């Protein structure tokens, strides 16, 4: 499949440039030249929770693997690997962003997939491209489960700005945003808990989080993370797979 025949969906990059108000309110953030160091309680919480959730999610992943196999047997065009990754950026560093495959393999551009380019998998935004299992997985955000491995490795955090593909990270930096250069990418963030609303993509939330990262004690930052996680759980319970 030629990716040029499948233009990038508008929903894939909702992130906007920093407004003048953001630049005036948080000038110290734009002066930072190095990624911010990990905070003790946040890092410890990430490791413990990621390890626990990987154990808890193992039966879910096994059931999903069985569902993938069964669907592939009955619908051959839907068979294929369950896991894949594309290159994302976290704290300015390229990392593998692991996901569960949602779409039929015929919708994956093979050369781009070999390079682990996001654009090769961009058809996942088209519901018609998804397998039956993929539709269920997307509805409840189960495709994000493999990223707990990235958290355990230290490539990501549970809370932080969502790590973007290399293509979108470069676009984000060209717009003038710096949050994804400064912080490890997260499964959830102040902006990400607004998925499905007009506020999704508003950069002010990411800058608010960086500001709190700088101002709060290590324990105070953990308390903020716990609140964001609670709000994220409510988004997941609602479903929708935005």
Image: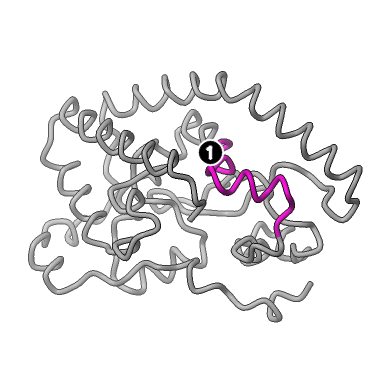
Q: Quadrant of residue 143?
A: top right
Height in image: 212 above or below 224?
below
Q: Is residue 210 left or right of residue 3?
A: left
Q: Which residue lies furthest to the bottom in this view?
A: 5
Give the percent coordinates (x, y) of residue 219: 18, 25
Figure check: 226 above or below 241: above
Q: Mark 1 points at which residue?
A: 147
Taking 66 as reference, is 173 above or below it?
A: below
Q: Give the range drawn in magenta.
A: 130-146
**Residue drawn 38% across the image and 36% down it:** 233
Image coordinates for residue 181, horizontal then vertical, percent: 34, 55
Say which of 118 and 31 sits in front: 118
Compared with 131, 51 (above or below) is: above
Q: Is the magenta stretch mostly helix, strand or loop?
A: helix
Q: Give the image location of residue 222, x and y in percent.
A: 24, 29
Q: Is residue 39 magenta?
A: no
Q: Pick out the residue farthest to the left.
A: 25
Residue in front for this viewpoint, 209 or 196: 196
Residue 208 falls left or right of residue 129: left
Q: How is the image coloured?
A: one colour
Point out the residue furthest to the front here: 238
- Residue density around tag 1, few if under 14, some if 14–19, many if 20 or more, within 10 Å: many
Residue at 68% x, 48% y is 134
């Amino acid at each position: 499949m030629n990716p040029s025949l499948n233009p990038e969906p508008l929903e894939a990059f909702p992130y906007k440039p920093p407004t003048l108000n953001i630049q005036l309110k948080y000038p110290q953030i734009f002066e930072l030249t190095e990624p911010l160091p990990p905070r003790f309680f946040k890092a410890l919480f990430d490791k413990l929770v990621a390890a626990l959730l990987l154990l808890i999610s193992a039966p879910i992943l096994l059931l999903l693997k069985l569902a993938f196999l069964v669907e592939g047997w009955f619908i051959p065009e839907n068979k294929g690997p369950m896991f894949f990754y594309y290159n994302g950026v976290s704290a300015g560093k390229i990392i593998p962003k692991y996901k569960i495959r949602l779409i039929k393999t015929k919708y994956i551009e093979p050369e781009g997939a070999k390079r682990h380019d996001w654009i090769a998998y961009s058809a996942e935004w088209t519901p018609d491209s998804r397998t039956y299992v993929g539709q269920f997985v997307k509805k409840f955000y189960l495709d994000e489960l493999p990223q707990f491995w990235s958290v355990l490795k230290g490539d990501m955090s549970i809370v932080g700005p969502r790590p973007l593909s290399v293509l979108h990270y470069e676009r984000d930096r060209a717009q003038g945003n710096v949050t994804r250069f400064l912080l490890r990418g997260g499964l959830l963030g102040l902006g990400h808990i607004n998925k499905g609303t007009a506020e999704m993509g508003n950069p002010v939330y990411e800058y608010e989080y960086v500001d709190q990262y700088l101002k709060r004690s290590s324990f105070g930052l953990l308390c903020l993370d716990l609140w964001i996680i609670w709000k994220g759980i409510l988004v997941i319970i609602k479903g929708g797979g935005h």
